Every structure is written in C-alpha cells, then in structure tokens.
Image (cartoon, rainbow, N blue to C red):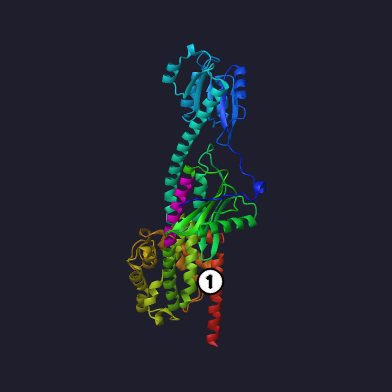
C-alpha cells in the first residue's frame, strides 16, 4: 500500500501554521564558564537534518540533574568529570543511565584532568559513548563529535520509535478487528485516532500530524467519515477531499495539497474504497511511512470485515423485522405492542446495567416474544369475550410454537429464550415448564414485566385499557411472586421518573383509535 505524497505547497506562507520543528538539545556540564562559552561559540549555527541546536548549560552535576528534570528530550551531553567533586561527572553518567533509565542520550566525557579519570577505566566501567580530552576538542573536532553523536541518537530513536510503532499497530489490531454493533462512523474515527497516534508516538518523535481525514467512496460520491485537527475552512476541506479522491482513483500525484501531505489509499480486493489523508509537520522518513502504510493495510482489511459484518447484521435485523411484521399481520391488536416492547426493553436493560450494544440486541429480540401466536387460530386471538379453559390452553401453546420457529439458530438464541419463557414466573408457577424465572437470562425476566404492563394499558378486544398508574401498581404487587423483584424495582424507577412517558403516550393514541373504531362498529 503506497503513500502518495504531495509535491507542491500552493498556498506558500498562507497555509495554516504548523507546529515548530524540534531542535536537538545539547547539555553542556562544566564548572568552567569559559569552556561553556567556547562550546557555545564553536557550535554556533550548527544544523543537522534540518534542525538546529539548543544548548543548555550547567555548572555542576547537581545543576545538571535539575535541568534534566525540565528537559526530558536532551539528545547529547558533554560532561566534565571533575566539578564539585572529583567524580561528579561520572556520578551524573550513572544518574542518567540508571536513575533516569535513559539509554538513548549520547554521553561524551570531556575532561581536562585525564589522570583523575583514565580513559580506559571510564570506558570500561561507565556507559558512555565517547571520551575526549579538552585539548583534543578544537572547533572542528567538537563539531564532528557532536554531529556524530546526534546522528547516532537520531538513528537509535528511529529504531526505538519503529519498535514502539509496531507495538502500537499490534495493540490496535484487536480493537480494529473487534466486530461489534458500533457504527461505521465510530469505526473510522477509531482508525484515524490510531493513525494519528502513530504520528505522535512520543514527545520526542520526529513526526507529528496536525490534521487528518478518512473518507470512503460510494459510487461517485466521496464521504468524509472522520476528521481530526483543525482545517482552515469548509472550502479547504472540500478541496482536500477532491484532490485526494483524484489521487487515489486515478493514481494522480496531488499538486495542490500542503507540502509534505500524504494520501494513503484504502484498498479492498485491490480496489480503492477510500483514503487516509495526513498532514505531518515535515516529511516522513521511510520507517514512518512504513508504519502508516501498515496501519492503513490493517484498516482496509478490517473495513472489509466490518462491512461484511454490517451486511450480516442488516440481514439479521431484516429477519427479525420480517418475523415481527408477520406476527403483527396475524394480530393487528398487538402490532404496535411489539414495537413498544422493544423500546421498553432497551431502556430497562440499560438501567439494569447491560451494555448499550447488548441492550439493543435484547430489545430487538424482544420483538419476537409473541411470534408463536402465528400458529394460534384467529377466532381465539381475536375473541372479544373471556376465553374458555380449552381456548386458554391453546393460547398457551404460542410459547412452544415460538420455540419451534426460532430454535436451532445461534443468532436467534436470545429471541428464542424470550419467546419460550417470558410467561414463566419468579415463583415457578408459570408456563410452559413451570420453572422459576431466575433460571433464565435477565432479558426474559425484563420482557415478562414489560409485556404485562403494556398489555394492561392497551386496548384489547376482550378488555378496556387500564390507567398506567394502576398497571404499574399491579406490576409492583407481582414482585417476588410473578416477577423478578430487581427488574420490578428498575421498572418502577424508570416509570416514576418519566422515562416511559413517550412510549405510554403512543399506546394511548393507539387505544383512542381502537375505541373510536369500536364506537363506529356499535352504531
């Protein structure tokens, strides 16, 4: 997966300001002010890899320790040995390597009293990178030593950042590939967060992104799915989207994007399905680009998997809705009841601590709680008067019918459990099996409560609707015998705080229509 780099910077100085470039930090530790001043003069104008040098001075080992607490990103330190004590510099080396646990900083011992710290002994016993006698360090030799040390520091940091980046990709993979009911928008925002994270691996990183965009293609449309950072204007945002789409779809190098911007194609089965656009503060090196490309490849694969999952989820939802519509067609009096059960159930499941995704799943499954009534004769379902014992026995078979319809499908396991057992009671005197309802999943116990409440407040051919307060009191009376007391307590809390008011009003509107129809038929 190849990154496409912009070649131009059309807006010149008018583009939004980026973060200032990092400088290389050099810590000079020496108790001789003249030596520190000479070092500063000899390194004036120092540049390496398009970055300048910031010199930090300390006159003792103790002062250096305090400065290191303020500057955690020092690249190189020139350390005198003899300062406040004969071995103050060596103690500082141990502090940096052991106490600060900093193996990256390049340490150069620079001494004017080699007899107090022999070169071979110091090199063998202390983790330093170079040893110089002050008489050796002419302006040229100082420049060479500092440049070599900084180059070594940069290469070590690049290797370490590459390692961190690989860990980042591996750690991100489970989240990217985790299949869930989250929206595609959440997925893309998570992907962009991971890509931006790769560009901000640490405070010392050589790359840092200021803006990022993920977009996908749908027919001829380009849809922005996620964005980060601050884009100057909607016009610029639209311009970026158009340029990136052309780059990915036509293989055209974008000419009109900000300098050093990158477009990363998202490919599914080798076909472009979108892109990731990032604006680092300066050009990415090869390892940086490899990390971003690796993440983009992971995201492309995850996107394909997620789209397949979304298609399957839509098919599942369609199947649920189809079965629910069949039940509604069979018994129009309970059609809107099915929709309300879904809404009640989701709210109550959340109140009982179920995760949002699980609550949505349980709500969807609850729509099929009475799907078994498909097999009940219309004459019994729509009978206006009280049912006989024989008719009631037939009505009770809807739980068996529901089980036979929904059984043997793992995706419908929750719906099957609800359809089969939502008439079981807390005290074990319900049907079809006469088992205590605590043996079943909480979703089934939720529907047991909700089903009764909504049925009580709804118009039926054989009864008038109850007032909601009266129906709620009836539910409360059944706690501990008919219903799970915990579910009833959560139900009453939501009822009393008005969480169900919108659903109840919908039921009352249906009741009004049904009562008006009854009046018309009687006249």
Q: Write down the region rendered in magenta.
A: 289-309
The x and y percentages for residue 103 are 46, 29
Residue positioned 42% across, 53% down in the render: 177
Asked if 283 appears above or below 148 in the picture, the reply is below
Is 300 included in the stretch rendered in magenta? yes
How crowded pointer 1 is (Cα within 10 Å; few <14, some 14-19, many 20+) is rated as many
Which residue in the rendered view is the most extreme toward the right? 14
Callout 1: SS: helix
In-front residue for pair 161/330: 161
Whether residue 440 can be seen here: yes
Q: How many numbered markers are drawn?
A: 1
Q: Which residue is mark 1?
A: 507
Which residue in the rendered view is the most extreme toward the bottom? 523
The x and y percentages for residue 454 are 49, 69
The x and y percentages for residue 261 are 56, 49
In-front residue for pair 248/190: 248
Is 123 included in the stretch rendered in magenta? no
In-front residue for pair 182/353: 182
Is residue 364 shown left or right of residue 214?
Answer: left
Residue positioned 56% across, 61% down in the render: 498
The x and y percentages for residue 232 are 64, 52
Whether residue 489 can be seen here: no
Q: Quadrant of residue 253?
A: bottom right
Provide the major secondary structure of the magenta segment: helix
Asked if 44 appears above or below 368 in the picture, the reply is above
Residue positioned 36% across, 68% down in the render: 406
Asked if 463 appears above or below 304 in the picture, the reply is below
């Amino acid at each position: 997966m190849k990154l496409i780099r912009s070649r131009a910077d059309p807006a010149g100085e008018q583009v939004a300001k980026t973060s200032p470039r990092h400088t290389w930090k050099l810590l000079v530790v020496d108790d001789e002010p003249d030596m520190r001043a000479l070092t500063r003069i000899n390194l004036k104008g120092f540049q390496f890899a398009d970055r300048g040098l910031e010199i930090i001075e300390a006159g003792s080992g103790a002062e250096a320790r305090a400065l290191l607490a303020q500057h955690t990103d020092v690249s190189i330190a020139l350390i005198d040995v003899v300062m406040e004590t004969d071995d103050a510099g060596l103690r500082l080396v141990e502090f940096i390597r052991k106490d600060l646990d900093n193996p990256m900083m390049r340490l150069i011992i620079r001494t004017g009293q080699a007899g107090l710290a022999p070169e071979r002994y110091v090199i063998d016993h202390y983790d330093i990178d170079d040893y110089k006698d002050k008489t050796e360090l002419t302006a040229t030799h100082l420049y060479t030593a500092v440049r070599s040390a900084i180059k070594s520091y940069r290469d070590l940091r690049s290797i370490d950042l590459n390692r961190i980046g690989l860990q980042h990709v591996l750690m991100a993979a489970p989240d990217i590939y985790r299949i869930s009911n989250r929206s595609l928008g959440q997925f893309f925002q998570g992907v962009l967060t991971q890509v931006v994270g790769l560009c901000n691996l640490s405070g010392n990183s050589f790359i840092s992104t200021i803006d990022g965009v993920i977009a996908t293609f749908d027919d001829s449309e380009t849809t922005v799915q996620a964005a980060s950072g601050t884009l100057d204007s909607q016009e610029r945002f639209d311009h970026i989207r158009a340029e990136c789409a052309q780059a990915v779809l036509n293989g055209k190098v974008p000419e009109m994007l900000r300098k050093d911007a990158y477009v990363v194609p998202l490919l599914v089965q080798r076909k472009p399905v979108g892109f990731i656009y990032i604006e680092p503060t300066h050009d990415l090196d090869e390892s940086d680009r490899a990390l971003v490309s690796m993440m983009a490849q992971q995201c492309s694969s995850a996107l394909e998997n997620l789209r397949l999952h979304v298609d399957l989820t839509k098919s599942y939802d369609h199947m649920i809705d189809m079965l629910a519509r069949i039940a509604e067609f069979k018994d129009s009096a309970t059609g809107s009841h099915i929709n309300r059960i879904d809404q009640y159930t989701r709210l109550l499941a959340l109140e009982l601590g179920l995760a949002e995704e699980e609550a949505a799943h349980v709500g969807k499954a609850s729509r099929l709680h009475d799907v078994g009534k498909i097999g009940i004769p219309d004459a019994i379902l729509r009978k206006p008067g009280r049912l006989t014992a024989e008719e009631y026995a037939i009505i009770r078979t809807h739980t068996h019918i529901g089980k036979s319809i929904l059984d043997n499908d793992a995706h419908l396991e929750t719906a099957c459990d609800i359809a089969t057992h939502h008439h079981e009671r807390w005290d074990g005197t319900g049907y079809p099996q006469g088992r205590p309802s605590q043996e079943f999943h909480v979703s089934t116990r939720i529907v047991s409560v909700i089903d009764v409440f909504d049925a009580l407040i709804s118009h039926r051919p054989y009864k008038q609707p109850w007032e909601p307060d009266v129906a709620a009191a009836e539910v409360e009376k059944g706690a501990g015998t008919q219903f799970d007391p915990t579910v009833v307590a959560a139900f009453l809390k939501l009822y009393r705080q008005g969480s169900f008011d919108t659903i109840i009003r919908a039921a009352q509107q249906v009741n009004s229509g049904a009562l008006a129809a009854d009046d018309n038929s009687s006249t």
